[in-house]
Image (cartoon, rainbow, N blue to C red):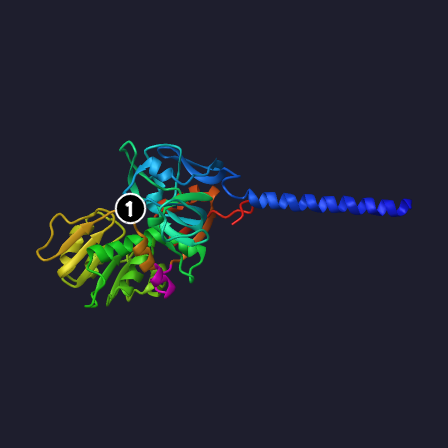
Amino acid sequence: STQSTGVEHNLAMLLKLMILVLLSTLAWAKCSSPQCQPEMQAYVATAAGEAEYRAATPIPQIGTLHSLYQLPAHTKCEVLLRVHTSSVNPSDVSPTIARYPKVLGSDVAGVVHQVGEGCTRLAVGDRVWGDIGANTLTSSGNKTKELGGYAEWVVALESQLAIVPEAWSWEQAGSLPKVALTSYKALAWYAGAPWKTSPTVLVLGGSGGCGGTGIQLARALGAGEIVTTTSAGNSEYCVGLGANRTIDYHKDNWWEVIGDNSVDVIYDTVGQNETGNRAMPKLKPQGWYVTITGQLADHTRPGRHQNMFINSDTNLVNFEMLNELGRFGQAGALFTRVNQTLGLAEVGKGFELSRTGHVVGKLVISADSQDMPI
C-alpha cells in the first residue's frame, strides 16, 4: 500500500542517515592522528624576543631531532607524544634559539603515540614526563635549545622520558621535570647527597619551583635541619614542603641571621649579587655551596666547595634520574603547588607572570583542547 511504502521509505532514509553519521564518526576518529591532521596548536618563537600563539603549525615527525641536532649515538630512539601539560620556567622565557620559527617549552607530560627505531623502554600508550629543554648544537654546529613542549604534539628522545607516577595528575607531571631534575642534580652531583650525616641545608628561594623541589629532595635525601628564605606569606607553604625554619627576606638578610661555620649545604636558586661571597663564611668544613644562577664566591675557603651548573647542559639522557624522582613522587615526597593553569594561547601571560619573580609553585600550560582527542 501507499502508506506502507512511505514508512519503508522513511525507515530507509533514517538507516542511511545513521550509516552516514557512523561513517563520519569513524573517519573523524581515524583522522585524529597527526598523519591525518598535520597541523597543531602551539606557542612559537618567531624571532629573537618575539613569540606568538599559532592555531595551526606543522606537527613534528619522528626523525626530526636527529635531522636537526647533533645528538649522542646512544640517543637513537625518538617518540611522538600527544602532550597534555607543560609549564613555565624562567629559562623558557628567552631561550637560545638558532633557527626560527621554533615551538617553545621545556617540560612535557603526555602519552606516547608512536615510537621510532631503536626504542627499548617505552611503548604506545605509556604516560610519560620529561624535560626536553636541552642545550645542544644544530646539525651545522650552532648553539640552540631543543624545546617543543608548548604544543599538542612533540617529538622527544626516549632517553629524556620516564613513566609518570600513578600518584601524579597531569598538572604535577608537566610542572616538575625541569625543577626536580635541577634540584636533584644540584644536591646529588654537587652537594654530596644522599647524606648519612643529617646535614644542615639552607635553600635560598624556597617558594619557587627549584626552591620547593630543593626543600623536598633535601629531606628525601637525608637532610637534618632545612632552613629556607621566603616571604612571611609563604612560610607555611615552605614548612609544608619540609623546611624546619624560614627566614623572611623582607625583614632579615639571611647572611646576617645564619651563623658562620653553621651550615653544611647552601643551595642558591635566587641569584642575588654577592651570594657566593656571603655563603662561603657560613659553610662548615667540607661544606658545599651550589648555585644555578652563577653567583659564585670570588674565593673558595679552604676545605669548602662551590659549583655552578646549568641543568639544560645535561638533559639528553635523564630517564634514570626521572625514575628516581618518580619514586619520590609516588611516595608523596615530591610535588608542587599549581599556581594556575593556562592554555597554549596564554603562554605569553605565563611569561609575564614569571618575569615578576614572585610565582609560588608552578604555572601549568595545558595542551588539551575540545577539538583534539586525547
Q: Is residue 121 above or below residue 332?
A: above
Residue in the foreground of this view, choosing between 224 and 297: 224
Residue in the foreground of this view, choosing between 7 and 366: 7
Residue at left offset 43%, top offset 54%: 126
Q: In this view, does 299 lie above or below 68?
A: below
* Image coordinates for residue 151, horizontal then vertical, percent: 45, 43
Residue in the foreground of this view, choosing between 201 and 23: 23
Q: In which quarter of the image is residue 211?
A: bottom left
Identify residue type, mark 1: His
Query: Which residues are the magenta region?
Result: 326-335
* Image coordinates for residue 253, horizontal then vertical, percent: 23, 56
According to the image, label 1 marks what residue? 74
Looking at the rendered structure, the secondary structure element under dot 1 is loop
Q: Is residue 359 above or below residue 34?
A: below
Label 1 neighbourhood size at 10 Å, few (<14), some (14-19), many (20+)?
A: few
* Image coordinates for residue 36, horizontal then vertical, percent: 53, 39
Judge whether residue 253 can be spotted in this image. no
In the rendered structure, the answer to whether residue 335 lies left or right of residue 251 reads: right
Q: Residue at the far right: name it.
A: 1
Judge whether residue 101 can be spotted in this image. yes
Q: Quadrant of residue 166?
A: bottom left
In the rendered structure, the answer to whether residue 302 lies left or right of residue 53 reads: left
Q: Residue at the far left: name it.
A: 302
* Image coordinates for residue 115, horizontal then vertical, percent: 41, 47
Asked if the magenta segment contains residue 331, the reply would be yes
Q: Quadrant of residue 49?
A: top left
Residue at left offset 30%, top offset 51%: 318
Residue at left offset 66%, top offset 47%: 22
